[in-house]
Image (cartoon, rainbow, N blue to C red):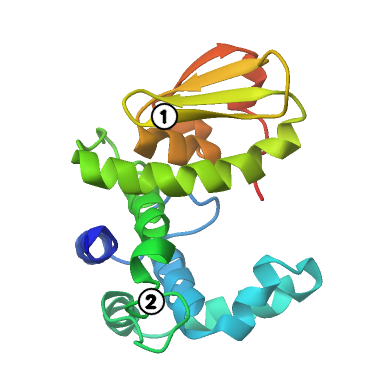
C-alpha cells in the first residue's frame, strides 16, 4: 500500500515547525497555527467537524478549533504528526483514502503562501492517487458553477460535469487540478479554455 498520506503529513508538519505558528497560509484568515489546529480537530473531534456540513453548528466547530489553537504550538504539531489510530479519518483502513489529498492541499496552502514558492514534482503514483479523489470532489464542487465543465489531466484521464458543450475546459496535472477544484484557483497552475470566470467562482461542496 502507498504511504502518500503519511509522507504529506510528515512534510507538512516539518514545514509548520520550520515556519512557526504565525506564518500566513492560503486559508483566508488562518495562520499556520490555525491550520494545524484544524487538522488536529478534524481527526480527533468528529463531533466538532459536523459544523463543516451543518452551518448552524459552525460556531461550535470554530470554538473547538480555537481551543486547540490556544495550546502550545509544539503540542499541536505533535498531534498533527501522530494521528489517533481510532479516528474515522486516520485509522490504517482509511488514512490513505481520507488524507492523501487533504494533506496535499493543506501542505500547498502553507507552501504557496510563502514567497518564491514553486510547484513540486510528484511521482506518477502520487498524482494518480490525487486524481482519484479529485474526480469525486470535482464533480461536487463544480455543480455550483452552473455550466458544463470538462476537466482534463493528461495521462490520467478526464471527466465532465453537466451535459452539453463545456463552457470551460480545465487542463493540468492532478495536483494542480485538485487545488483548483478546492477553491485555490488563484495559485493553481491550471490552463482554462473558455469561460474564465471559473477562476474566481466559488467552488465548494
Q: Quadrant of residue 118?
A: top left
Residue 108 to residue 143: above or below? below
Q: Mark 1 or mark 2: which comes first in sequence?
A: 2
Give coordinates of residue 204: x percent, y percent: 65, 46
Residue beneath the point at 44% across and 84% down? 87
Decide if residue 27 is on the left or right side of residue 106: right
Q: In whole angstroms, how far apart are the C-alphas of marks 1 and 2?
A: 28 Å
Q: Is residue 205 visible?
A: yes
Instruction: Name the residue nearer the viewer: 25 or 146.
Output: 146
Residue beneath the point at 54% across and 38% down? 181
Question: Disc number at residue 90?
Answer: 2
Residue beneath the point at 65% across and 36% down? 142
Q: Quadrant of residue 31?
A: bottom left
Residue located farthest toward the right when viewing the structure as drawn: 56
Look at mark 1 in the image and give the residue it sits on: 157
Instruction: Name the residue nearer the viewer: 144 or 69.
Output: 144
Give coordinates of residue 86: x percent, y percent: 41, 89
Mark 2 burial class by Cα count in 10 Å: few <14, some 14-19, many 20+: many
Decide if residue 72 is on the left or right side of residue 81: right
Question: Disc number at residue 24?
Answer: none
Q: Nearer the viewer's eye, disc 1 or disc 2?
A: 1
Residue 188 to residue 55: above or below? above
Give coordinates of residue 79: x percent, y percent: 33, 82
Residue 18 to residue 138: above or below? below
Q: Quadrant of residue 189?
A: top left
Residue beneath the point at 45% across and 40% down? 179
Q: Is residue 23 visible?
A: no
Amino acid at each position: 500500500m502507498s504511504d502518500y498520506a503519511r509522507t504529506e503529513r510528515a512534510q507538512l508538519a516539518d514545514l509548520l515547525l520550520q515556519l512557526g505558528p504565525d506564518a500566513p497560509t492560503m486559508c483566508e484568515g488562518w495562520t499556520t497555527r490555525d491550520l494545524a489546529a484544524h487538522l488536529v480537530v478534524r481527526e480527533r473531534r468528529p463531533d466538532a467537524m459536523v459544523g463543516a456540513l451543518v452551518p448552524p453548528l459552525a460556531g461550535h466547530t470554530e470554538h473547538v478549533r480555537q481551543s486547540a489553537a490556544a495550546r502550545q504550538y509544539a503540542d499541536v504539531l505533535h498531534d498533527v504528526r501522530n494521528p489517533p489510530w481510532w479516528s474515522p479519518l486516520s485509522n490504517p483502513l482509511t488514512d490513505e483514502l481520507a488524507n492523501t489529498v487533504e494533506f496535499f492541499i493543506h501542505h500547498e496552502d502553507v507552501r504557496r503562501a510563502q514567497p518564491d514558492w514553486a510547484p513540486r514534482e510528484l511521482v506518477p503514483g502520487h498524482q494518480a492517487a490525487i486524481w482519484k479523489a479529485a474526480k469525486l470532489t470535482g464533480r461536487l464542487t463544480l455543480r455550483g458553477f452552473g455550466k458544463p465543465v470538462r476537466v482534463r489531466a493528461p495521462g490520467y484521464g478526464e471527466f465532465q460535469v453537466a451535459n452539453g458543450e463545456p463552457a470551460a475546459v480545465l487542463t493540468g496535472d492532478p495536483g494542480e487540478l485538485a487545488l483548483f477544484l478546492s477553491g485555490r484557483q488563484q495559485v493553481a497552475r491550471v490552463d482554462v479554455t473558455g469561460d474564465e470566470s471559473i477562476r474566481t467562482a466559488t467552488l465548494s461542496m
